[in-house]
Image (cartoon, grey):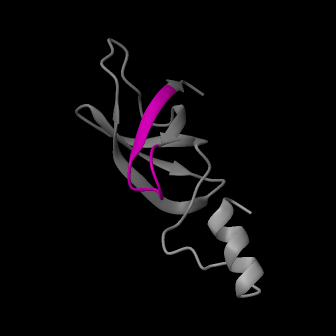
Amino acid sequence: MRNSADAFNELIIGRPAKVSKPQTNGHMEGRVIEVIGSTAIVVIPEYDPTKRFGPMRFGRTSNPPQVDDVCLIAFVGAGIDRAWLISWAAQ
């Protein structure tokens, strides 16, 4: 169960509520596939190796991410609509 609303749905309806938006963990590991200015496009193999996430912002840096870097992504809020590239490193 994710929260009290889920518990309520399971108790009253007998089954969990359907999630209208894809849900992820708060932080996930991905791989940078494209860098555009101060944003990046990534894939998250654990979630869906064919889905492209982004563009997502990364902080100001003198060492921006490069294609094929392994990265840590933080999802903010509900769903997958707001993500930030937190850290990255060459593989």
Point out residue 11 in the picture as x, y percentages from the top left corner. 77, 79
In the rendered image, which quarter is residue 39 located in? top left
Quadrant where the C terminus sits is: top right
Residue depicted at 67% across the width and 62% down the height = 4
Point out residue 84 in the picture as x, y percentages from the top left corner. 41, 37
Determine whether, in the image, residue 74 is placed left or right of residue 1.
left
Which residue range is magenta in the image?
A: 76-87
| Relative depth, front residue between 37 and 75 | 75
In the rendered image, which quarter is residue 35 located in? top left
Determine whether, in the image, residue 17 is placed left or right of residue 88.
right
Residue depicted at 60% across the width and 79% down the height = 18
| Relative depth, front residue between 17 and 63 | 17
Residue depicted at 62% across the width and 53% down the height = 45
Determine whether, in the image, residue 71 is placed left or right of residue 34.
right
| Relative depth, front residue between 69 and 54 | 54
In the rendered image, which quarter is residue 76 located in? top left
Point out residue 38 in the picture as x, y percentages from the top left corner. 26, 31
- Residue 80 is a magenta residue: yes
Query: 62 above or below 29?
Result: above
- Residue 33 is a magenta residue: no
Residue depicted at 38% across the width and 48% down the height = 82
Quadrant where the N terminus sits is: bottom right
Point out residue 7 in the picture as x, y percentages from the top left corner. 73, 69
Question: Of all residues shown, which one is farthest toward the bottom?
Answer: 13
